[in-house]
Image (spheres, helix red, strand yellow):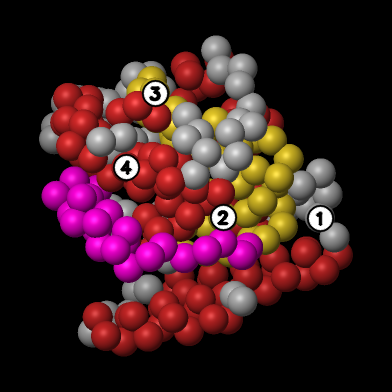
């Protein structure tokens, strides 16, 4: 994957813009979303499964605005995931989500869909050019998201899956359905996001590289449990990025 980097000005602007938005997206992950959204042609739409309060939505939408202004369909029931709920009570996040989009100036390219992934998929008939899965992290739910939305992803489009480091559900689906799949090339990871480009069938060379990336991902995942100073973390991330080149 050869995408132009962000300029330092754009990066600083987006870091400042999203700093106050609650969420668990790193700057490096946000940059990946921005670059891939910017590269979209508009032949299909961008779909985000799990928006929470809009941190990742803003990165995607700003990338879209810098490119072909591809529509970002942001799907979330806005009742909070299980880890956000106290005593099982739903947490309404939609109002804050809309306020964050307004503050970022991205409302014109975002279409919010207040629904579960399954509810939205049942009525969705558009081609998807970029798919970002970051919904319920339980294995059976991540598997369902993949099976519902992967067929809608156009050939040549990119799938991204968040929290494939440390989280057992997304990690397992990524390993089963991206790294070991014959339907992905240009596979890689940026911190906890695993990504790949959909193809009808990848080549033997692609499959060899995907297995190599799976090994790197496994090592990176295990090392993520080791407490180290932030400076060493930054160096480690740079090394793993270089090993994927």
Is 193 on the left-hand or right-hand side of 181? Answer: left
Q: Residue at x 56, y 55 (%)?
A: 195
Alpha carbons under labels 4 and 1: distance apart: 32 Å
Q: Nearer the viewer, mark 3 or mark 2?
A: 3
Task: Return the mark for residue 22.
Answer: none
As displayed, is residue 244 above or below residue 92? below
Residue 53 placed where, x, y %? 24, 37
Q: Quadrant of residue 44?
A: top right
Q: Secondary structure at mark 1?
A: loop
Alpha carbons under labels 2 and 4: distance apart: 19 Å
Residue 61 placed where, x, y %? 38, 40
Asked if labels 4 and 2 touch by Cβ distance under 8 angstroms, the answer is: no
Q: Secondary structure at mark 4?
A: helix
Residue 203 placed where, x, y %? 85, 60
In magenta, the rendered stretch is 1-23
Alpha carbons under labels 3 and 1: distance apart: 33 Å
As displayed, is residue 221 above or below residue 144? below
Of the two numbered discs 3 and 1 on the same chain, state the one appearing first in sequence: 3
Q: Residue at x 65, y 43 (%)?
A: 157
Task: Return the mark for residue 202.
Answer: 1
Of the 4 image quadrants, the one containing the C terminus is: bottom right
Of the two numbered discs 1 and 2 on the same chain, state the one appearing first in sequence: 2
Residue that badge 3 annotates: 111
Q: Is residue 24 visible?
A: yes
Task: Return the mark for residue 195.
Answer: 2
Farthest residue, direction right: 204
């Amino acid at each position: 994957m050869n995408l132009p980097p962000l300029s330092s000005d754009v990066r600083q602007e987006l870091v400042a813009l999203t700093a106050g938005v609650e969420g668990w997206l790193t700057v490096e992950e946000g940059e990946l979303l921005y670059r891939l959204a910017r590269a979209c042609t508009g032949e299909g739409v961008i779909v985000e499964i799990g928006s929470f309060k809009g941190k990742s939505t803003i990165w995607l939408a700003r990338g879209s605005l810098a490119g072909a202004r591809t529509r970002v369909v942001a799907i979330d029931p806005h009742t909070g995931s299980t880890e956000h709920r106290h005593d099982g009570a739903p947490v309404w996040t939609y109002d804050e989500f809309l306020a964050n989009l307004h503050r970022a100036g991205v409302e014109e390219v975002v279409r919010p869909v207040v629904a579960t992934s399954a509810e939205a998929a049942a009525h969705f008939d558009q081609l998807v050019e970029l798919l970002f899965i970051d919904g319920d992290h339980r294995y059976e739910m991540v598997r369902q998201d993949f099976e519902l939305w992967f067929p809608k992803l156009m050939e040549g489009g990119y799938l991204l899956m968040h929290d494939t480091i440390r989280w057992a559900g997304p990690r397992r689906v990524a390993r089963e359905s991206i790294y070991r799949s014959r339907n992905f090339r240009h596979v890689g990871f940026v911190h906890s996001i695993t990504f790949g480009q959909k193809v009808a069938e990848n080549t033997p060379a692609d499959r060899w590289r995907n297995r190599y990336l799976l090994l790197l991902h496994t090592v990176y995942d295990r090392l993520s449990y080791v407490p180290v100073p932030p400076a060493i973390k930054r160096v480690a991330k740079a090394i793993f990025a270089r090993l994927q080149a």
